[in-house]
Every structure is written in structure tokens, then in C-alpha cells.
Amino acid sequence: MQGLFFESDSGVRYVLRALVVILGFWTAWRTGKSVAEGWGEYPTVVIYTLLLGVVMRFLHYALFAGPMLNGFYYITDIVLLLAFATVSFRVRRTSQMVDNYYWLYDRTSAFSYKKKD
């Protein structure tokens, strides 16, 4: 029987699944940050996250015998990964703009900046 967000597991597979989830979240974080560091645009983050979602689906399929082509699990993976990638992209882009163009921009939060008066 399937769980709500993941396929059913037991025992030490929980630890392995936690490691795979942490690896996915860390990779999504680094993806958003690296696109921002390369001065890329946000749609690039979305494309990379969609590809990362396919990789995560494959890991769940290969390691846990979960379904490879399941829309619900793929969308769930994409939403979570995109949240991490978006946060890291916005944090890094804000730091770039405020640090590199300190005479033009002020930080308003960790995720945004504004033009100086």
C-alpha cells in the first residue's frame, strides 16, 4: 500500500530514504545558488529543478522499487525541490545585488532589495 508522500518502507530503508531526501534538498539548494552566482535567470532554476525531479524519481525507483512514472510523486518532488531552489536563488541574488552594487541597492529582507533613494 502506498503512503501519502512516499512509497511504504520499513526498517533501515527509512534512514536511506532520509539520506536521499537530504541529498535532493541540498542539490536543489546548490542549484538555485549556482544559477544566481552565474547571473542566470529564474526560468533556468525551474528547468534545472524539473530535471532534478526526474533524477529524484529515478533514485526512488532504483533504491526503493517505487513507481518511476507517477505524476503525484513527481509533482510532490518538484514542489519541494523548487521551494529550496527558489529560496537559495533569491537569497544569493539579493546578496549579489546588495554587495556588488551597494551604492544602488539596500537590502529589505533576505529575499529582496530596493533601490536607494
Image (tube, helix red, strand yellow):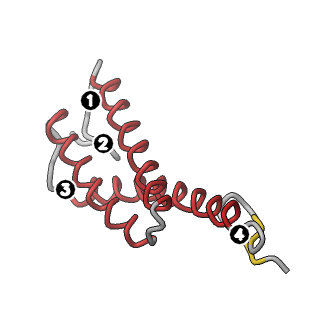
**Element on which disc 1 rests:** loop
Name the residue type under label 3. Answer: Asn
Question: On the image, which quarter does residue 35 sit in?
Answer: bottom left
Question: On the image, which quarter does residue 1 sit in?
Answer: top left
Name the residue type under label 1. Answer: Asp
Q: Is the residue 111 above or below the residue 59 in the image?
A: below
Residue at 44 percent across and 48 percent down: it is: 30
What's the CA distance linking mark 4 and mark 3? 39 Å
Residue at 31 percent across and 32 percent down: it is: 17
What's the CA distance linking mark 1 and mark 3? 17 Å
Q: Give whichever of discs 4 and 2 has the lower sequence position.
A: 2
The residue labelled by disc 1 is 9
The residue labelled by disc 4 is 113
Query: How many marks on residues?
Result: 4
Residue at 35 percent across and 58 percent down: it is: 78
Residue at 33 percent across and 26 percent down: it is: 14
Q: Are marks 4 and 3 in contact (CB under 8 Å)?
A: no
Q: Is the residue 61 above or below the residue 89 in the image?
A: above
Please state the horizontal and vertical placement of residue 15, each as a whole percent of the image: 35, 23
Q: Are marks 3 and 2 in contact (CB under 8 Å)?
A: no
Q: Are marks 4 and 2 in contact (CB under 8 Å)?
A: no
What's the CA distance linking mark 3 and mark 2? 11 Å
The residue labelled by disc 3 is 70
What's the CA distance linking mark 4 and mark 2? 38 Å
**Element on which disc 2 rests:** loop
Q: Is residue 95 left or right of residue 52?
A: right
Q: Are marks 2 and 1 in contact (CB under 8 Å)?
A: yes
The residue labelled by disc 2 is 6
Q: Is the residue 22 above or below the residue 40 in the image?
A: above
Mark 4 closeness class: few <14, some 14–19, many ≥20 residues within 10 Å: some
Q: Give whichever of discs 1 and 4 has the lower sequence position.
A: 1
Name the residue type under label 4. Answer: Tyr
